[in-house]
Amino acid sequence: MLAGAGALSLALTGGVVAMTGTAQAATKTTPVPVKCVAPAPQPGANGTQDYTITVPDTAKAGQSVPITIDPGETPVIPMFTIDTVNTIKAKLLVGGVAQTVTGPAVPSHQEAGKKSDPPAFSGTITVPDGSEGTTLQITIDQVVTDADLGGTVYTTTCTPDPRPSASVGSIAVEALPKDPVTTKVTPNSGKAGTAVSVTGANFPAGPVTCSALLAGAATGDTGSGTADASGAATCGLTVTKKADAIRIDGSVTPYKSFVFVEDQAGVKNPVDVEVLPGPLALGPKDGQPAVSFGAVTINGKAQSVFGAFNAATVQDFRGGSLGWDVTATRTPFLNSSTGHSMAKAQIGIQPSCTVTNPDSPSTCTAGAPGAITDTPMKIASQAAGGDELTGGEFAVGGAAMLQLPPFMFADTYQSVVTFSIA
Protein backbone atom coordinates (compact mmCIF):
# COMPACT_ATOMS: atom_id res chain seq x y z
CA MET A 1 0.00 0.00 0.00
CA LEU A 2 1.27 3.45 -0.90
CA ALA A 3 0.04 6.65 0.71
CA GLY A 4 -0.12 10.28 -0.41
CA ALA A 5 -0.37 12.78 2.46
CA GLY A 6 -1.73 16.30 2.42
CA ALA A 7 -1.00 18.55 5.40
CA LEU A 8 -3.46 21.06 6.82
CA SER A 9 -1.70 23.66 8.92
CA LEU A 10 -3.35 26.31 11.06
CA ALA A 11 -1.84 29.43 12.59
CA LEU A 12 -3.71 31.52 15.18
CA THR A 13 -1.82 34.65 16.18
CA GLY A 14 -3.36 37.82 17.59
CA GLY A 15 -6.83 36.39 16.99
CA VAL A 16 -6.33 35.67 13.27
CA VAL A 17 -6.66 32.20 11.79
CA ALA A 18 -4.46 31.64 8.72
CA MET A 19 -4.54 28.48 6.68
CA THR A 20 -1.70 27.18 4.61
CA GLY A 21 -2.07 24.03 3.66
CA THR A 22 -43.75 10.78 -9.21
CA ALA A 23 -45.55 8.82 -6.70
CA GLN A 24 -47.55 9.40 -3.51
CA ALA A 25 -45.89 12.10 -1.43
CA ALA A 26 -44.74 11.45 2.13
CA THR A 27 -44.33 14.18 4.76
CA LYS A 28 -42.05 13.91 7.77
CA THR A 29 -41.27 16.42 10.53
CA THR A 30 -37.88 16.10 12.20
CA PRO A 31 -36.44 18.18 15.09
CA VAL A 32 -32.92 19.16 14.05
CA PRO A 33 -30.41 20.60 16.58
CA VAL A 34 -28.72 23.55 14.88
CA LYS A 35 -26.06 26.17 15.45
CA CYS A 36 -26.80 29.48 13.73
CA VAL A 37 -24.32 32.23 12.91
CA ALA A 38 -25.99 35.59 12.21
CA PRO A 39 -24.47 38.82 10.87
CA ALA A 40 -23.17 41.33 13.42
CA PRO A 41 -24.44 42.87 15.61
CA GLN A 42 -27.12 40.19 15.65
CA PRO A 43 -26.01 37.36 17.99
CA GLY A 44 -26.07 33.77 16.81
CA ALA A 45 -28.02 31.06 18.59
CA ASN A 46 -28.13 27.33 19.27
CA GLY A 47 -31.37 25.39 19.46
CA THR A 48 -33.73 22.98 17.73
CA GLN A 49 -35.50 23.69 14.46
CA ASP A 50 -38.37 21.53 13.17
CA TYR A 51 -37.97 20.71 9.50
CA THR A 52 -41.00 19.32 7.63
CA ILE A 53 -40.00 17.69 4.36
CA THR A 54 -42.36 16.36 1.69
CA VAL A 55 -40.97 14.06 -1.02
CA PRO A 56 -42.41 11.22 -3.16
CA ASP A 57 -42.57 7.80 -1.56
CA THR A 58 -40.91 6.22 -4.60
CA ALA A 59 -38.95 7.32 -7.65
CA LYS A 60 -36.62 6.02 -10.34
CA ALA A 61 -32.85 6.46 -10.40
CA GLY A 62 -31.90 9.59 -12.36
CA GLN A 63 -35.37 11.10 -11.96
CA SER A 64 -35.90 14.70 -10.81
CA VAL A 65 -38.61 14.78 -8.14
CA PRO A 66 -40.35 17.58 -6.23
CA ILE A 67 -39.47 18.44 -2.65
CA THR A 68 -41.12 20.87 -0.23
CA ILE A 69 -39.19 22.20 2.76
CA ASP A 70 -40.84 23.96 5.71
CA PRO A 71 -37.99 25.13 7.97
CA GLY A 72 -40.04 25.92 11.10
CA GLU A 73 -39.01 28.54 13.67
CA THR A 74 -35.29 29.27 13.84
CA PRO A 75 -33.55 29.68 17.22
CA VAL A 76 -32.32 33.14 16.17
CA ILE A 77 -34.12 35.99 18.03
CA PRO A 78 -33.55 39.33 16.24
CA MET A 79 -32.55 42.41 18.20
CA PHE A 80 -34.38 44.78 15.83
CA THR A 81 -37.68 45.02 13.97
CA ILE A 82 -36.79 44.90 10.30
CA ASP A 83 -38.22 44.36 6.81
CA THR A 84 -36.07 42.43 4.34
CA VAL A 85 -36.36 40.23 1.27
CA ASN A 86 -35.14 36.73 2.17
CA THR A 87 -33.82 33.87 0.04
CA ILE A 88 -33.28 30.45 1.63
CA LYS A 89 -30.80 27.90 0.27
CA ALA A 90 -31.09 24.42 1.79
CA LYS A 91 -27.98 22.34 1.19
CA LEU A 92 -29.04 18.68 1.33
CA LEU A 93 -27.38 15.29 1.03
CA VAL A 94 -29.57 12.99 -1.08
CA GLY A 95 -28.23 9.49 -0.56
CA GLY A 96 -24.90 11.15 0.27
CA VAL A 97 -24.91 13.31 -2.89
CA ALA A 98 -24.83 17.06 -2.26
CA GLN A 99 -27.74 19.02 -3.77
CA THR A 100 -29.08 22.52 -3.07
CA VAL A 101 -32.73 23.61 -3.11
CA THR A 102 -33.18 27.39 -3.35
CA GLY A 103 -36.42 29.11 -2.41
CA PRO A 104 -37.79 32.27 -4.04
CA ALA A 105 -37.00 35.75 -2.77
CA VAL A 106 -39.79 36.48 -0.25
CA PRO A 107 -40.53 39.74 1.66
CA SER A 108 -40.13 39.26 5.43
CA HIS A 109 -41.25 41.38 8.39
CA GLN A 110 -39.37 40.42 11.54
CA GLU A 111 -40.34 41.67 14.99
CA ALA A 112 -37.59 42.29 17.53
CA GLY A 113 -37.46 39.68 20.30
CA LYS A 114 -39.49 37.09 18.35
CA LYS A 115 -38.19 34.00 16.62
CA SER A 116 -38.23 33.98 12.84
CA ASP A 117 -40.57 31.48 11.15
CA PRO A 118 -39.43 31.16 7.51
CA PRO A 119 -42.03 30.18 4.90
CA ALA A 120 -42.13 26.79 3.23
CA PHE A 121 -40.66 26.57 -0.27
CA SER A 122 -40.44 23.98 -3.03
CA GLY A 123 -37.93 22.80 -5.61
CA THR A 124 -36.57 19.59 -7.08
CA ILE A 125 -33.89 17.06 -6.23
CA THR A 126 -32.41 14.36 -8.46
CA VAL A 127 -32.34 10.70 -7.45
CA PRO A 128 -28.71 9.59 -7.95
CA ASP A 129 -27.93 7.05 -10.65
CA GLY A 130 -26.90 3.64 -9.34
CA SER A 131 -29.33 3.75 -6.40
CA GLU A 132 -31.82 1.24 -7.82
CA GLY A 133 -33.41 -0.99 -5.18
CA THR A 134 -32.27 1.14 -2.23
CA THR A 135 -33.98 3.59 0.11
CA LEU A 136 -32.34 7.02 -0.12
CA GLN A 137 -32.07 9.04 3.07
CA ILE A 138 -32.24 12.84 2.82
CA THR A 139 -30.26 14.83 5.39
CA ILE A 140 -29.63 18.54 5.94
CA ASP A 141 -26.03 19.67 5.57
CA GLN A 142 -26.58 23.43 6.00
CA VAL A 143 -29.25 26.12 5.54
CA VAL A 144 -28.27 29.62 4.44
CA THR A 145 -30.63 32.63 4.53
CA ASP A 146 -29.69 35.75 2.58
CA ALA A 147 -31.59 38.84 3.79
CA ASP A 148 -31.56 41.77 1.36
CA LEU A 149 -31.90 45.14 3.10
CA GLY A 150 -31.82 48.00 0.61
CA GLY A 151 -29.37 46.22 -1.66
CA THR A 152 -27.08 44.98 1.12
CA VAL A 153 -27.24 41.24 1.79
CA TYR A 154 -26.87 39.87 5.32
CA THR A 155 -26.36 36.11 5.63
CA THR A 156 -27.42 33.81 8.46
CA THR A 157 -26.07 30.26 8.38
CA CYS A 158 -27.61 27.41 10.38
CA THR A 159 -25.65 24.15 10.56
CA PRO A 160 -26.98 20.90 12.07
CA ASP A 161 -25.09 19.65 15.11
CA PRO A 162 -24.04 16.94 14.44
CA ARG A 163 -23.56 17.65 10.75
CA PRO A 164 -25.23 16.42 8.61
CA SER A 165 -28.57 16.02 10.35
CA ALA A 166 -30.45 12.82 10.99
CA SER A 167 -32.68 11.70 8.13
CA VAL A 168 -35.46 14.21 7.42
CA GLY A 169 -37.04 12.21 4.59
CA SER A 170 -36.57 9.12 2.43
CA ILE A 171 -37.36 7.86 -1.07
CA ALA A 172 -37.59 4.20 -2.09
CA VAL A 173 -35.82 3.85 -5.44
CA GLU A 174 -37.38 1.35 -7.81
CA ALA A 175 -35.37 -1.77 -8.53
CA LEU A 176 -35.45 -1.79 -12.32
CA PRO A 177 -34.86 -5.02 -14.26
CA LYS A 178 -31.25 -5.31 -15.34
CA ASP A 179 -30.44 -5.53 -19.04
CA PRO A 180 -29.51 -8.98 -20.36
CA VAL A 181 -25.81 -9.15 -21.19
CA THR A 182 -23.42 -11.64 -22.76
CA THR A 183 -20.70 -12.31 -20.21
CA LYS A 184 -18.20 -14.82 -21.61
CA VAL A 185 -17.25 -16.81 -24.72
CA THR A 186 -15.23 -20.04 -24.35
CA PRO A 187 -13.04 -20.40 -26.31
CA ASN A 188 -12.79 -16.82 -27.54
CA SER A 189 -10.92 -17.77 -30.72
CA GLY A 190 -10.68 -20.58 -33.27
CA LYS A 191 -11.01 -21.59 -36.89
CA ALA A 192 -14.00 -22.89 -38.79
CA GLY A 193 -15.60 -25.80 -36.94
CA THR A 194 -14.85 -24.46 -33.45
CA ALA A 195 -17.57 -25.24 -30.89
CA VAL A 196 -18.19 -22.27 -28.60
CA SER A 197 -19.99 -22.01 -25.26
CA VAL A 198 -21.38 -18.55 -24.50
CA THR A 199 -22.80 -17.42 -21.15
CA GLY A 200 -24.94 -14.46 -20.09
CA ALA A 201 -26.78 -12.87 -17.18
CA ASN A 202 -30.18 -11.25 -16.47
CA PHE A 203 -32.18 -13.29 -19.02
CA PRO A 204 -35.77 -14.45 -18.48
CA ALA A 205 -35.86 -18.09 -17.44
CA GLY A 206 -36.36 -20.44 -20.39
CA PRO A 207 -34.85 -21.15 -23.80
CA VAL A 208 -32.32 -18.75 -25.36
CA THR A 209 -30.59 -18.53 -28.73
CA CYS A 210 -27.12 -17.27 -29.59
CA SER A 211 -25.49 -16.09 -32.80
CA ALA A 212 -22.18 -15.11 -34.35
CA LEU A 213 -21.62 -11.63 -35.85
CA LEU A 214 -19.24 -9.97 -38.29
CA ALA A 215 -19.13 -6.16 -38.26
CA GLY A 216 -22.45 -6.20 -36.39
CA ALA A 217 -24.30 -8.40 -38.90
CA ALA A 218 -25.32 -12.00 -38.22
CA THR A 219 -23.21 -14.59 -40.06
CA GLY A 220 -25.86 -17.33 -39.96
CA ASP A 221 -24.13 -19.42 -37.28
CA THR A 222 -26.64 -19.88 -34.45
CA GLY A 223 -27.22 -22.09 -31.44
CA SER A 224 -29.59 -22.70 -28.56
CA GLY A 225 -29.51 -23.01 -24.80
CA THR A 226 -31.40 -22.16 -21.61
CA ALA A 227 -31.52 -19.57 -18.84
CA ASP A 228 -32.18 -20.67 -15.27
CA ALA A 229 -34.40 -19.00 -12.67
CA SER A 230 -31.57 -16.66 -11.61
CA GLY A 231 -31.18 -15.33 -15.17
CA ALA A 232 -27.88 -17.13 -15.87
CA ALA A 233 -27.90 -18.33 -19.47
CA THR A 234 -25.72 -20.86 -21.32
CA CYS A 235 -25.82 -21.37 -25.08
CA GLY A 236 -23.70 -23.32 -27.57
CA LEU A 237 -22.94 -22.84 -31.25
CA THR A 238 -20.38 -23.91 -33.86
CA VAL A 239 -18.49 -21.21 -35.76
CA THR A 240 -18.34 -22.09 -39.48
CA LYS A 241 -17.78 -18.63 -41.00
CA LYS A 242 -15.59 -15.65 -40.21
CA ALA A 243 -16.90 -13.81 -37.11
CA ASP A 244 -15.65 -11.09 -34.78
CA ALA A 245 -18.26 -11.28 -31.98
CA ILE A 246 -20.73 -13.68 -30.39
CA ARG A 247 -23.86 -12.86 -28.38
CA ILE A 248 -26.80 -14.45 -26.68
CA ASP A 249 -29.70 -12.93 -28.62
CA GLY A 250 -31.43 -10.13 -26.76
CA SER A 251 -28.20 -8.93 -25.16
CA VAL A 252 -27.28 -5.27 -25.04
CA THR A 253 -23.91 -4.21 -26.41
CA PRO A 254 -21.03 -4.63 -26.10
CA TYR A 255 -20.99 -8.22 -27.29
CA LYS A 256 -18.08 -10.57 -26.54
CA SER A 257 -15.24 -10.58 -29.04
CA PHE A 258 -14.26 -13.67 -31.02
CA VAL A 259 -11.02 -13.99 -33.00
CA PHE A 260 -11.50 -16.10 -36.15
CA VAL A 261 -8.29 -17.89 -37.13
CA GLU A 262 -7.82 -18.57 -40.82
CA ASP A 263 -5.32 -21.16 -42.10
CA GLN A 264 -2.57 -19.61 -44.25
CA ALA A 265 -0.29 -21.41 -46.65
CA GLY A 266 3.47 -21.34 -45.99
CA VAL A 267 5.91 -21.86 -43.15
CA LYS A 268 4.48 -21.12 -39.72
CA ASN A 269 6.61 -19.07 -37.30
CA PRO A 270 4.97 -18.70 -33.84
CA VAL A 271 5.59 -15.41 -31.99
CA ASP A 272 5.20 -15.40 -28.19
CA VAL A 273 5.08 -12.45 -25.81
CA GLU A 274 4.72 -12.37 -22.03
CA VAL A 275 2.91 -9.33 -20.56
CA LEU A 276 3.87 -8.74 -16.92
CA PRO A 277 1.60 -6.94 -14.45
CA GLY A 278 2.46 -3.39 -13.40
CA PRO A 279 1.80 -1.73 -10.04
CA LEU A 280 -1.24 -0.36 -8.25
CA ALA A 281 0.10 2.98 -7.02
CA LEU A 282 -1.10 6.18 -5.38
CA GLY A 283 1.10 9.23 -5.66
CA PRO A 284 2.98 11.37 -5.34
CA LYS A 285 4.90 9.32 -2.77
CA ASP A 286 6.45 12.44 -1.22
CA GLY A 287 3.07 13.94 -0.33
CA GLN A 288 1.10 16.93 -1.48
CA PRO A 289 1.50 20.65 -0.74
CA ALA A 290 -0.50 22.05 2.18
CA VAL A 291 -4.20 22.75 1.66
CA SER A 292 -4.82 26.51 1.71
CA PHE A 293 -7.93 27.94 3.38
CA GLY A 294 -7.15 31.67 3.29
CA ALA A 295 -7.70 33.54 6.57
CA VAL A 296 -10.40 33.63 9.27
CA THR A 297 -10.77 35.96 12.27
CA ILE A 298 -11.65 34.41 15.61
CA ASN A 299 -15.05 35.79 16.66
CA GLY A 300 -16.26 33.45 19.40
CA LYS A 301 -18.49 31.47 17.06
CA ALA A 302 -17.99 28.21 15.21
CA GLN A 303 -16.83 28.91 11.67
CA SER A 304 -16.37 26.96 8.44
CA VAL A 305 -13.69 27.64 5.84
CA PHE A 306 -13.25 25.99 2.46
CA GLY A 307 -10.41 24.78 0.27
CA ALA A 308 -9.53 21.81 -1.92
CA PHE A 309 -7.44 18.67 -1.59
CA ASN A 310 -4.96 18.51 -4.43
CA ALA A 311 -5.66 15.59 -6.73
CA ALA A 312 -3.56 12.49 -6.09
CA THR A 313 -2.79 10.17 -8.99
CA VAL A 314 -3.96 6.56 -9.08
CA GLN A 315 -2.28 4.18 -11.50
CA ASP A 316 -3.66 0.67 -11.88
CA PHE A 317 -1.40 -1.20 -14.27
CA ARG A 318 -2.04 -4.70 -12.88
CA GLY A 319 -3.64 -6.01 -16.07
CA GLY A 320 -6.43 -7.95 -14.40
CA SER A 321 -10.01 -7.54 -13.22
CA LEU A 322 -9.39 -6.37 -9.64
CA GLY A 323 -10.81 -3.21 -8.08
CA TRP A 324 -9.37 -0.75 -5.59
CA ASP A 325 -10.43 1.65 -2.83
CA VAL A 326 -8.81 4.94 -1.82
CA THR A 327 -9.41 5.88 1.82
CA ALA A 328 -8.47 8.88 3.95
CA THR A 329 -7.57 9.32 7.61
CA ARG A 330 -6.24 12.28 9.57
CA THR A 331 -4.27 13.17 12.67
CA PRO A 332 -5.53 15.66 15.32
CA PHE A 333 -4.77 19.38 15.04
CA LEU A 334 -1.73 19.79 17.29
CA ASN A 335 1.24 21.98 18.09
CA SER A 336 3.77 19.56 19.51
CA SER A 337 6.00 22.39 20.78
CA THR A 338 3.39 24.22 22.87
CA GLY A 339 1.13 21.27 23.63
CA HIS A 340 -1.94 23.06 22.32
CA SER A 341 -4.58 21.18 20.35
CA MET A 342 -7.97 21.70 18.70
CA ALA A 343 -9.87 18.54 19.55
CA LYS A 344 -13.19 19.93 18.26
CA ALA A 345 -11.93 20.95 14.82
CA GLN A 346 -13.35 18.82 11.99
CA ILE A 347 -12.25 18.27 8.39
CA GLY A 348 -14.80 17.37 5.73
CA ILE A 349 -14.40 16.38 2.09
CA GLN A 350 -16.65 16.26 -0.98
CA PRO A 351 -14.72 13.53 -2.85
CA SER A 352 -14.04 13.57 -6.60
CA CYS A 353 -12.54 11.01 -8.96
CA THR A 354 -11.87 11.51 -12.68
CA VAL A 355 -10.32 9.39 -15.44
CA THR A 356 -7.13 11.05 -16.69
CA ASN A 357 -6.13 8.51 -19.36
CA PRO A 358 -8.84 8.13 -22.05
CA ASP A 359 -7.59 4.62 -22.82
CA SER A 360 -8.42 3.45 -19.28
CA PRO A 361 -10.68 0.37 -19.40
CA SER A 362 -12.33 1.35 -16.09
CA THR A 363 -14.19 4.27 -14.59
CA CYS A 364 -14.03 5.28 -10.94
CA THR A 365 -16.65 6.31 -8.39
CA ALA A 366 -16.28 9.09 -5.82
CA GLY A 367 -17.25 8.34 -2.21
CA ALA A 368 -19.98 10.08 -0.21
CA PRO A 369 -19.23 13.45 1.43
CA GLY A 370 -18.37 13.36 5.12
CA ALA A 371 -15.90 14.03 7.89
CA ILE A 372 -12.36 12.62 7.80
CA THR A 373 -11.38 11.01 11.11
CA ASP A 374 -8.88 8.41 12.32
CA THR A 375 -11.20 5.73 10.89
CA PRO A 376 -10.58 5.15 7.15
CA MET A 377 -13.18 6.95 4.99
CA LYS A 378 -13.75 5.78 1.39
CA ILE A 379 -12.82 8.61 -0.98
CA ALA A 380 -12.97 6.80 -4.34
CA SER A 381 -13.13 3.30 -5.77
CA GLN A 382 -12.89 1.21 -8.92
CA ALA A 383 -15.21 -1.79 -9.03
CA ALA A 384 -13.88 -5.26 -9.78
CA GLY A 385 -14.55 -6.28 -13.37
CA GLY A 386 -15.50 -9.95 -13.06
CA ASP A 387 -14.57 -11.27 -16.50
CA GLU A 388 -13.75 -7.79 -17.81
CA LEU A 389 -10.42 -5.97 -17.82
CA THR A 390 -10.01 -3.18 -15.26
CA GLY A 391 -7.34 -0.54 -14.65
CA GLY A 392 -6.31 2.89 -15.84
CA GLU A 393 -5.14 6.26 -14.59
CA PHE A 394 -7.21 8.53 -12.36
CA ALA A 395 -7.13 11.72 -10.27
CA VAL A 396 -8.57 11.59 -6.74
CA GLY A 397 -9.20 14.63 -4.52
CA GLY A 398 -12.11 16.82 -3.53
CA ALA A 399 -13.46 20.00 -2.04
CA ALA A 400 -12.37 20.48 1.57
CA MET A 401 -14.12 22.12 4.50
CA LEU A 402 -12.62 22.87 7.92
CA GLN A 403 -14.98 23.51 10.84
CA LEU A 404 -13.34 25.51 13.62
CA PRO A 405 -14.51 25.72 17.26
CA PRO A 406 -15.58 29.12 18.71
CA PHE A 407 -12.50 29.43 20.93
CA MET A 408 -8.96 28.07 20.84
CA PHE A 409 -5.40 29.08 21.66
CA ALA A 410 -3.80 31.51 19.21
CA ASP A 411 -1.10 29.21 17.94
CA THR A 412 0.11 27.22 14.93
CA TYR A 413 -1.54 23.84 14.44
CA GLN A 414 -1.20 21.07 11.91
CA SER A 415 -3.16 18.00 10.90
CA VAL A 416 -2.04 15.52 8.26
CA VAL A 417 -4.61 13.87 6.00
CA THR A 418 -3.31 10.61 4.53
CA PHE A 419 -4.78 9.00 1.42
CA SER A 420 -4.17 5.23 1.06
CA ILE A 421 -5.01 2.69 -1.62
CA ALA A 422 -5.72 -1.01 -1.41
Image (cartoon, grey):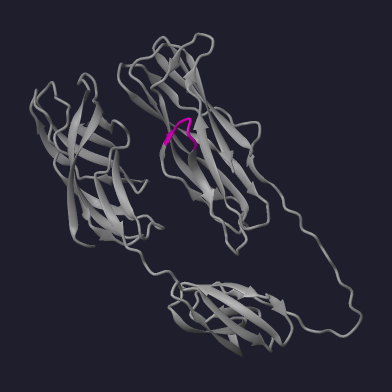
For the point 68% across and 52% down, which residue is it? 318
User: Please, which residue is most extreme toward the bottom here?
Assistant: 220
Say which quarter of the image contains residue 321: bottom right
Q: Give the range drawn in magenta.
A: 371-376
Q: Is residue 192 in view?
A: yes
Tell me what residue is drawn at x 47 percent, y 33 percent: 375
- State the image coordinates of residue 107 (x, y, percent, origin top left): 13, 38
Query: Is residue 154 shown to the viewer in this render?
Result: no
Residue 182 appears left or right of 113: right
**Viewer-proximal residue, 417 or 142?**
417
Q: Main secondary structure of the magenta part?
A: loop
Does residue 114 appear left or right of residue 21 in this picture?
A: left
Question: Closest to the observer: 300 or 367?
Answer: 367
- At a point 30% along the width and 20% down the height, the residue shown is 301
Can you give x and y, in whole percent of width and height, for residue 187 in the image?
A: 68, 76
Can you say whether 201 is above or below 335 in the image?
A: below
Report the side of 405 relative to 86 (left or right): right
* Quadrant into which the C terminus falls: top right
Q: In which quarter of the image is residue 246?
A: bottom right
**Label tally:** 0
Quarter where residue 69 is shown: top left
Q: Is residue 101 magenta?
A: no
Residue 375 lies within the magenta run: yes
Q: Nearer the viewer, residue 92 or 135?
A: 135
